[in-house]
Image (tube, rainbow, N blue to C red):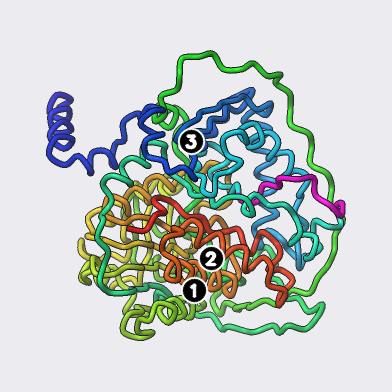
Amino acid sequence: MSARLKQLDAILRRDHRAYGDLADPKPIGVAETQSLLQPDEAVVFILPVEEATFLFAVSNGTIVWAIAPIGNEALTKTVAKLRRQLDPEQWQTRPLEPFDRAAAHRLYRDLWQPLESVLADKSQVFVVTTGPLTSFPLSVLVTEAPKGGTAGDADPQALRDTAWLVKRHALVTLPSVSSLKALRLYANKSTGSEAFAGFGDPSFDAVTVATRIGDVPDILRQPTPAEAHQVQVLAPLRATISGSIERQRVARNLTLPSSPLPSLPLTAAPENSRFQLHRQSLPLFVATAATSSANAGSVASVFRGNEPDPKKLRRLAPLPATGPELRALAKTLGASETADVYVRERATEAQVKTLDLSKKRVIAFATHALMAGDMGLGEPGLVFTPPASASERDDGYLSASEVARLNLRADWIILSACNTAAGDTPGAAGLSGLARAFFLAGSKSLLVSHWPVWDNAAMRLTTGAVANMQKNPAQGRGQALRQSMLTLMNDKSAAYFAHPAAWAPFILVGETRAN
């Protein structure tokens, strides 16, 4: 069997080189990496180990490496704390959670500043991370000592004035260093002829009633922790991005020079400072669930071994705010807000498989996304309206292997999804499998989010990024997303737009350049 597998692997790599390089990327050397980069681009690779973190930066003419004095355990604790401050579901009764900018600045000094000799003049930086950093967007690192003390950590104007890393670079995530080669050399060069297809707001048995809490100062409605499992507070919700790649596998994807690494002292990371609360009014859309906890199913409960149970899929919490988001994207792209948007009973796995999606330039999925591993599920995937009876063609769950068999030519795949299984555990698995599946299907890039985000913020970020790319394709998708983030950050119509919880959830994964 082993010999036969090796034979098949050799055939795939000989006759289907693009598939082989994407499905099982081989190590890539520094010189080859440099040949793939433009003068304004660089690649950063961050590898935490027990007592330190190894840092590498490569441009088309330079390479630099360093050892940061923060080990995996300390890094995990710092990231977990900052990650909680970025997830509005964790805020409980606070309308605007302070974000520890001093801790984010210390992370910048540890993880990014040692590489500045390569990165300082680069407008776009590809980032490959492992371990706890896979659940944390580096765009929220702070490049200068923050002003305003801890009070400024929740002050909208102080947050807008903060020297966030996103103000310097467009950051683009890669599953591995070698994936840059596969995406740049083999990704479909042609683009679909039709603007858009959007799938979301699947039809489940549970019912929600949307309620608006207006923009009245000091009015706040938050669910209790018990309600949070079944009450829809923020939409669209968590996407499939909290994934990681095994450190050893990723390390092999960049062949480094044999020169010895510089020796730096290894010390523990400093403790984060405590916060002073600074309350601001925060308008929210709150949906009150009409189902009881006995009827509202958890994501982990919908599987029988490796197969989804359609009856339990129907008990997942509805996502009523995802329909308006999809229609807004359709409008931005000049597509039909009815014909090109598939919601409720039309949002089926069979519909995805039947449509000729190779014609679409932008495809959005606004639904629950599940991760492999935690629940015994073999593959990550996306949930759709469950069928009356499950079949191989439609069981309500589009797995990663089924995604890989789609024929796509999309410039953007937007995953604005609720992943109630992955949580915010740093290093949780998921990104590599689902992202690679979309790349294997022919997609060029994914726009995905780290945590639940307000529906109006999500709509602004996604439609803004797509619109920016339409106006100026030469800037690339990374810069298009960066500009959308900065625009939202500086919008004073809502105080919480200044918080990184609003402007930083989405990241771009994959290729950024236009055809």
Q: Tell me the number on the disc at residue 237.
A: 2
Could one spot residue 510 in this view of the protein? yes
Q: Quadrant of the C terminus?
A: bottom left
Q: CA distance from mark 1 to mark 2?
A: 8 Å
Whole-angstrom CA distance, mark 1 to mark 3, is 42 Å
Do the numbered discs 2 and 3 sit on residues whose CB atoms are within 8 Å?
no
Q: Which residue matches tag 3? A: 59
Q: Is residue 231 visible?
A: no
Q: Main secondary structure of the magenta part?
A: loop
| Disc number lying in front (2 or 3) | 3
The magenta region covers 139-150
In the image, 137 versus 319, the foreground residue is: 137
Q: CA distance from mark 2 to mark 3?
A: 35 Å
Closest to the observer, 264 or 386: 264
- Disc 2 crowd rating (10 Å Cα; few below 14, some 14-19, many 20+) is many
Residue at 64% across, 22% down: 51
- Find residue 76 and report its horizontal and vertical position in percent: 64, 37
Q: Which residue is mark 1?
A: 319
The first of marks 1 and 2 along the sequence is: 2
Verify whether residue 148 appears in magenta: yes
Q: Is residue 345 left or right of residue 317?
A: left
Q: Secondary structure at mark 3?
A: strand
Three-letter code for the amino acid on which mark 3 is drawn:
Ser
Q: Amino acid at mark 2?
A: Leu
